[in-house]
Amino acid sequence: MVAGNIRVLVAKPGLDGHDRGAKVVARALRDAGMEVIYTGLRQTPEMIAEAALQEDVDIIGLSILSGAHMALVPRILELVKANGQDDLKLFLGGIIPDEDIAPLKEMGVTGVYGPGASTEDIIADVRASVQKTA
Amino acid sequence: MSLSQAVLNQDRLALSRLLTRIENDSAEGRAALDELFPHTGNAHLIGITGAPGTGKSTLVNQLALYYRKAEKRVAIVAVDPSSPFTGGAVLGDRVRMRDLSGDKNVFIRSMASRGSLGGLAQTTAAVVQVFDAAGFDVILIETVGAGQAEVDIAKLAHTTLVVEAPGLGDDIQAIKAGILEIADVLVVNKADRPGVENTERALKGMLELAHPAKRVFQHHGQQMVVEASETPEAESPIWIPVVKRTVAKDGTGIDELGEAIEKHLAFLRTGGEWAARERAQLQSTFDALIRETLFKRFLDDLSAEGYQELISKMVERSLSPWSAVQSLLNGSEE
C-alpha cells in the first residue's frame, strides 16, 4: 500500500498529436483523488523515465495512438529499471491491436485500454496495481 | 547508507524518494531533514508567483536555462492546487519545461498544495531544504496561480518575482495591498501583447508612490539627490523593486531579468538583508511547526468522541469555541 496520495505520470510518447484521451484519463484520476503529473505531447522514452524518477510516481500511464507501442513500452520499462525504480507500474491506453495485449502484459504492463474503456475500470486497476507493491 | 547520506552523495533516486516521504510527513522524512539541516543555507531561493496564465512555468523554464548557462545546478519546485473535494490534482507545470529534460543538473519536482491556502504546500519549505542540502545552487519555487493574497512565498524565498501580463487589471489593482507588495522584481510577461505599456505604467506608478523618484539626503554634509533608476545598484541601502519586460515563450528579456535577480542577490549579500531573510524564513518555518505540532498534540490528547462532543456542545451553543480551547489548555476535556 502506497503511503500518501497515489502519484501518476500521464505521458504521450511518440509523434501522434491527439492527447484528448490522455487528458480525460488525467482528469478522471484526479477526481479519484490521485496526484497526476501531466507532461504533454511528444515525449521521448528518456524524457518519460526522467520525469518518473524526479516525480517519484507510483505508476505511469501512456497514451499511444501511433502503433509504436511495441517499441516504446519496452524501452521505457528498460530505462525505468535502469534508474532503479523496480516497483514502478505502467498502464497503456490508445489504439492497441488485440494480439499485442498479451505480450505487453508479459512485459509488465498492468492494463491496456482501448476506445470505450471506462475510466472507472482504469481507476480501479490503478488502485489495485499500486497497492500490490506493499 | 541512510537516505540523507545518499542525497548528499547526489543520488537522484534517493532524493526523489526522500521528497515523497517529506510530502507525506513520515517519520523517516523528518529524521532525514534533521540530518540534512546543517547542510542547508547555501542556495539562492527564487520565488515566482502571479495569476494563473501569466506564464510562470514558461518563465521558470527560461530562468532555469539562464542559470544553466552559468553552470549552476537548478532545482525547480512547482506547486499546483489540490482539489478541495477529492484531494486529487493535475500537476501540469512540466508541460512548459520540456527544454530542461535530459539535463542531469536540473531537477523538477511537482507538488500538489494538499489543502494549504497560501500558494505553497505545507511541506514546500522542507522540500526546498532538501534541494538546498543536495547542493543545488538555485532553487526556483513556482507557486499556485495566485490571486491577491497568496504571499507565503515571500517568507520562503530570498528573491520574489511577481509575474503580471498585459490586460489583467487597471491601476487600482496596482495600488491594492497584497501580492504586488512582496515583489523584489516585477515581471511583465507576454510583453509582445497589446497593452503592455499600460501594465508597465501602472506598476511603475505604484512603485513610485512607495519609493518617490527622487530621494534627497545628507551625505558628508552635502545634499545628495538619488534618482530612481531602472537598475538599482547593489550597494544602495534599500532595494527598490524593478519592472522587467519579458516574452518567456521566445526568451526575450530573460537575460535582463536574470541580471536584475543577480543584482538583488548581490544587494542581499552585501547588506545585512540575507541574514535578515534567513532569520525571517526560519522563524516562519518554526512558527508553522509549533502550530502544527501543538494542534496534533491536543488532538492526540482528545478522544475522537470527546472532540465530536465538544463540537456538538458548540452547535447547541452551550460551549463557546473559546472556552473549549481554554479548557483544553487547562488540561481537561470539560
Image (cartoon, helix red, strand yellow):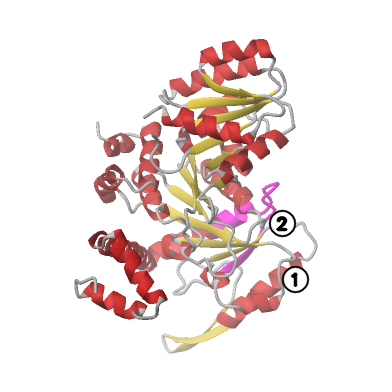
Q: Which chain carries label 1?
A: B
Residue B232 found in image quarter = bottom right
Q: In the rendering, at what x and y percent does residue B23 appear?
A: 40, 47
Which label's residue is closer to the chain start, 1 or 2?
2
Residue B301 found in image quarter = bottom left
- The residue positioned 47% from the left and 44% from the top of the image is B74
Q: In which quarter of the image is the N terminus of chain A?
A: top left
Q: How crowded is mark 2: few (under 14 residues within 10 Å), some or many (20 or more)?
A: many
Whether labels 1 and 2 belong to a single chain: the reply is yes
Q: Is residue B261 left or right of residue B327?
A: right
What residue range appears in magenta? Answer: B241-260
In the rendered image, which residue does mark 2 sit on?
B190
- The residue positioned 65% from the left and 72% from the top of the image is B203
Q: Would residue B222 be visible to someone looking at this image? A: yes
**How far apart, in angstroms, are the residues tagged by discs 1 and 2?**
13 Å
Question: Please, what secondary structure does the residue beneath circle 2 have?
Answer: loop
In the rendered image, which residue does mark 1 sit on?
B198
Q: Quadrant of the C terminus of chain A?
A: top left
Q: Which chain carries label 2?
A: B
**B263 versus A120 height, above or below:** below
